[in-house]
Amino acid sequence: MNWYLNVLKKYAEFSGRARRTEYWMFVLFNSFFLVAAMIIDNIAKITLNGLPYGYVYILYSIVVLIPGLAVTIRRLHDIGKSGRMIFIVLVPLVGAIWLLVLLLIDSHSGENEYGENPKSILTDGPTSNESVADDLLLFAGIWILFSRLFWSILPRIVENLFSSEWFKLVNSSMFLITAVVPISIAFAAKNKKKRMTLFILSGVNFIVILYEIMKIFI
C-alpha cells in the first residue's frame, strides 16, 4: 500500500525514474480500487445509462489519471526510454504488448540521463523486499474479504447478475487482478532461480486467465 501512496505523493512528477516494484504495486492496488468503485456505483444505483460504472468510478479515474501517467513515464525513464514511448500503445495490436514488455524490463544499472537508479537511492518510500512482501500479504487479505463480500452481497441486490454485461466486465477485471498478483510476488523473490520460476508460473497463469476472459465475451 505504501508504494501506491508513494505514487500519489509524486502526483504530477514526470521527471526521474520509477523501478518496476513501484509501478506494478501501483497498478495492482489501483486495479483493486477501480473494481471497488465500479461495485459501489452498482450498489448505489448511480451507473450511467446502463454502463457498468458511474460517478464514483469516473471521479476516482480522474483523480489517479495524472499520477498513473506520471509513474508510467518514470518507469520508461528507468529503462532509458523517453516518456514519448508511451504513445506506442496507439499502434494497433502490437502497441499494447510492446509497452507491456517495456514496463516489465528491469532498471538500467547505474545512472542514466533521467537520474540515478532508484534501487540505489534511499527515499521516504519503501525500499526493501520485506516491505513489498508485507504489501502483498495485506493486499491478499483485503482481496479475500472483498471477493467474499462481492459474491455474497451483489447477487442478492442485482437482478440477472451473471448474465449482465457489466458483471462480465467486473469479473474480467477481477481475473486480471488475480493474474497480476503472482507477477508482483515474483518481483519480491530474492533468489534469482526462484524468481525466474515464479515468473514462468505467473506467465502460464496469466495466459490461462486471458483464455478464461476470452470465453466470457465470446
Image (cartoon, rainbow, N blue to C red):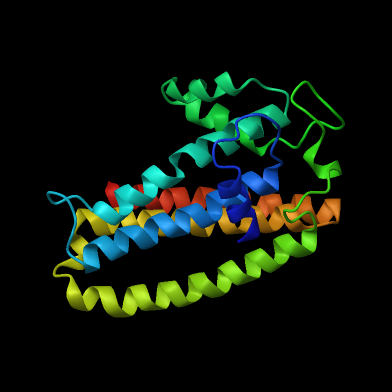
Residue lying at 68% horizontally and 59% vertically, measured from the top left: 185
Quarter of image, res 38: bottom left
Q: Could you tell me if residue 11 is visible in this image? A: yes
Between 9 and 52, the one lying in front of the other is 9
Between 183 and 54, the one lying in front of the other is 54
Between 69 and 185, the one lying in front of the other is 69
Query: In the drawing, does residue 156 fall left or right of residue 183?
Result: left
Query: In the drawing, does residue 131 fall left or right of residue 25?
Result: right
Residue lying at 21% horizontally and 53% vertically, measured from the top left: 165
42 vs 193: above or below = below
Q: Could you tell me if residue 205 is visible in this image? A: no
Quarter of image, res 120: top right
Residue lying at 23% horizontally and 63% vertically, measured from the top left: 42
40 vs 144: above or below = above
Q: In which quadrant is the N terminus drawn?
A: bottom right
Q: Position of residue 167 (x, y in %)?
A: 26, 59
Q: Position of residue 79 (x, y in %)?
A: 72, 29
